[in-house]
Image (tube, helix red, strand yellow):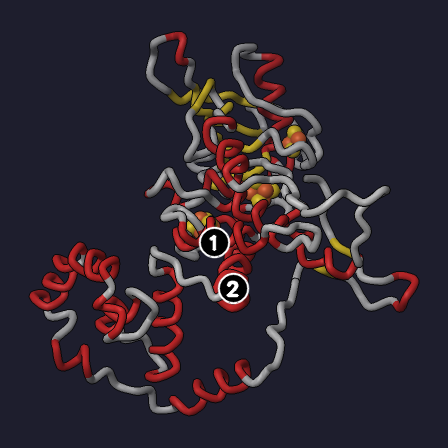
Amino acid sequence: MPDYTLKIRRFDPESGRPAYWQEFGVDLPEERSVLDAILRAKDEQDGSLSIRCSCQAAICGSCGVRINGMSRLACNTKLSEAAEDGRNGAIVVEPMGNMPVIKDLIVDMDAVHWKKVQRVVPWLLPEGDPPAREYIVDPESMIDVTQSMACIHCGACVSACLSLEVDPEFIGPAALAKAYRFVGDPRDAHTEDRLLDLAEDPHGIYDCTHCFACVEVCPKDVAPMDQIMRLRRRATADYGIKDQNNGYGHEKAFTDLIEKYGTLSEAQLLPKSYGDGSLIRAQVKPAALKELGAKFPTVIRGLTSGKVSPKTALLHHKLQDQDQIRRIYEEVESKEDRLELNLYIVGESGGEEEGATSEGGQEE
Ligand code: SF4
Ligand code: SF4
Ligand code: FES
C-alpha cells in the first residue's frame, strides 16, 4: 500500500486524446513535497508525465500547479498537508487555470502571464541623461515597492483570479503588481502616464473585483490585490484621474453612500457610479448614458422582482449608529497626509544598525 495517491490530470495534445485522470501511488515520507512525489512517479512509473520545475526551493516560480483545487507551488507543498485536503484519499493535481495547457501540468505562461507583464511596460522609464554612475535613491523610498519586487512569477495568482476567468483580457494580478513596482519607484518619470493608461484600460485596475484569491494563493506574500488598490489610490487621490470606465465614480459612490447611510444603498449605487460619482451630473455624460442604457435590463429586473422600489431607492434607511461611521470618515479625512502602511515590512525595531527587514526575496 503506497503512502500517498496522486490523482493527476493528464493531457497530451499530440495524442489526439482528450484530457483524463491518472492515479499514481508513491511511497515517500510526509515531509517531502508534492513535487517530489510527482517526480518519483515520473521516474518510476511513467516517464511521459510532464511538469516544469527547477529550484525545488520555492524560488524559481516554475512549478505552479493546482493541488486539490488551490493554485500552489508543488515544491512548497508538503505531502502530509496536501493529503489532509485530498479528495477520496487522493491528492488531486491539475495544471494551473486561466492559461492554455501545453502538456499535463505545464501551462503556456507566455500566452497569458508574460504577455500581460509586457503590457505594463515592466522597466524603468527615467527622464534626462543617465547619471555618470548609478541612480542613487533614498532606501526608505523603496520600501513601498519591496512587496511587489518579491514576485517570483509563478502564475499562481493568475491561475486563481476570478476576474481573469470572466474577462481573459484583464491585465491581471501579477502584471498589475509589477506595474506598481514601477509606479512606486521614485526613479520613474512616467508615473501619471502609467496610472492613466491602467485606469483608462477597460481591462485595467478597475477590472479587479476584490475577491482576495490572489492574496490567498501567493507564495511570496506579494498580495497583488493590495498593489492594485495602491495603484487606484495613486490614480485617484494623487492624480485625480476620473476614468472612462467609471471606476473612480463607482468607488466614490460607494464611499459616499456608506458615509451617508452606514450601509450600501444598492439602488443608488448604479446611477451614482456613472461619471464622476454625483447623482445628477453623471447622468448627462454621453458615456454615462450609454452605460446606464446597457444596465437598463438590470434595473427593470430589480424593480419587477421587488428587490428595489422607487421608494427604497430614494429613501434608504440610515444605520442607528451612523454617527460612528461618520467619525471614522472624519478621522481619516482629517489627516494631512495619506498614511500607507506597508504591512510587508516585518521585524522589530532594532535601532539604526539593524533597521527594518523585509521578508521574502528581492527577485524581479
Ligand atoms: S483580488 Fe482582483 S486581481 Fe486578485 S484574484 Fe481577485 S479579481 Fe483577481
Ligand atoms: S504575485 Fe505571487 S502568486 Fe502572483 S506570480 Fe508573483 S509570486 Fe506568484
Ligand atoms: S521548482 Fe522552483 S519554485 Fe518550485
Q: Say what amino acid the circle numbered 1 marks.
A: Leu
Mark 1 nearby-residue class (10 Å; few <14, some 14–19, many ≥20): some
The answer to whether mark 1 and mark 2 are in CB contact below 8 A is: yes
Q: Residue at x 51, y 23 (%)?
A: 106
Mark 2 nearby-residue class (10 Å; few <14, some 14–19, many ≥20): some
Most extreme residue toward the right is 353
Left or right for 171, reference 363: left
How far separated are the C-alphas under marks 1 and 2?
Answer: 9 Å
The dot on residue 239 is 2
Q: How many marks?
A: 2
Q: Position of residue 337 (x, y in %)?
A: 62, 76
Query: The C terminus appears in which quarter of the rendering?
Result: top right
Q: Position of residue 326 (x, y in %)?
A: 44, 87
Q: Residue at x 34, y 68 (%)?
A: 276
Q: Say what amino acid the circle numbered 2 marks.
A: Tyr
Q: Is residue 90 visible?
A: no
Q: Is residue 17 visible?
A: yes
Q: Which residue is mark 1?
A: 196
Q: Residue at x 22, y 59 (%)?
A: 286
Q: Nearer the viewer, residue 75 or 172?
A: 172
